[in-house]
Image (cartoon, helix red, strand yellow):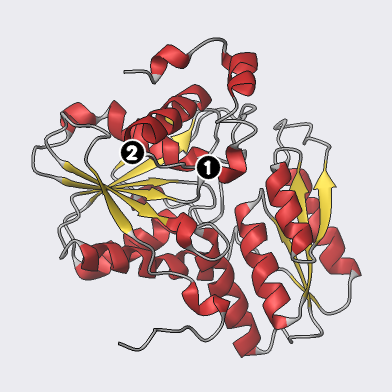
Amino acid sequence: MPEKTFPGILSTVGNTPLVAFEKLLPDLGSRVFGKIERFNPGGSIKDRSALGMLLAAIRSGNVEPGRSVIVESSSGNLAVGLAQICRYFGLRFICVVDGKTTGQNLAILKAFGAEVEVVTERDHLTGEFLPVRLRRVRELVDRIPDSYWPNQYTSLLNPKAHETTMREIEEALDGKVDFLFCSVSTFGTLRGCRDHIRARGLDTTIVAVDAMGSAIFGLESTQRLIPGHGASVVPPLMDASASDEVVHISDLECVTACRRLIDREAVLAGGSSGATVAALWKIRHRIPDGSNCVLIFPDGGDRYLDTIYSDSWVRENFGDVSYLWKD
């Protein structure tokens, strides 16, 4: 049989595996699956959004390979996806990140040739970095000729990319997706999955997984330790009707779920992935037996080795809590 090849690295975005977890919650009475988005070439689900937004801009003429300058704000994963795509198309890329961006993500950005601006000042009203990052992006776009801001926070191409994510899940389970657990940040993934679910008439309960201290669903914005989910301001793409239920997860619950996941399933997952596991754990008693529960895992845990998977970091921030994930 001839070997299957791909026409360039960007053609490998999407079609990530859906993995059955048999040991994660053995007493649940339902099947649990993880949509493992770390298998995208840039290592996260944000590759889908990045590719959708940039390809549309190139096709429309708003971005010209070899000439345009891409400017975006990101806490990490979208930045990596954009950096890889920009390098592929010969585009200069300036990324505005903040102090919570992991050292590994920063190293990956530099390897792809991205220009990185690190915001260290927090917004005086929210105590968060995001408003300051966005202000800096606007300044750069106003100053730099031929610059283009994809703007993951407002672009409808962000959720559009994730209609495909949900289509892949539907096809893998022959349409029987009873519960979908999706962490929220820009609201792109959840909204795109919702659009596909409604278009197909699927009987799927959508559970939005947000961070404690996130402002998305009306909580007071407070400082959070783990990047990747939650937001200090309500994202423009937010649609409260897109989910059937909201579950808020603390930083410690994220850590516990990630550690339990690697202990029981040998899956090294990122913080927002662990949040979906923690959310399923919280509402497990309300899941009817025989359900198919799908958890979207936005990225892997290799970029959280200095935080979630560091025993010293966990002890420093939470004390000795290892008993929480030990059987």
Q: Which residue is mark 1?
A: 301
Point 46% across, 42% down: residue:
269
Q: Which quadrant does the C terminus fall into? A: top left
Q: Quadrant of residue 197?
A: bottom left
Point 34% across, 64% down: residue:
195
| Residue 280 percent across, percent down from the top left | 29, 34
Dot 2 falls on a residue whose secondary structure is helix
User: Do the numbered discs 2 and 1 sit on residues whose CB atoms are within 8 Å?
Assistant: no
Q: Is residue 146 left or right of residue 177?
A: right
Residue 112 can be seen in this image: yes
Q: Nearer the viewer, residue 161 or 234?
A: 161
Point 76% across, 81% down: residue:
90
Q: Which label is found at residue 265? A: 2
Task: Give the class, few, some or many, for how many residues have Cα within 10 Å of label 2's Cα (few <14, many ≥20).
Answer: some
Dot 1 falls on a residue whose secondary structure is helix
User: Of tags 2 and 1, which is closer to the observer?
Assistant: 2
Residue 134 can be seen in this image: no
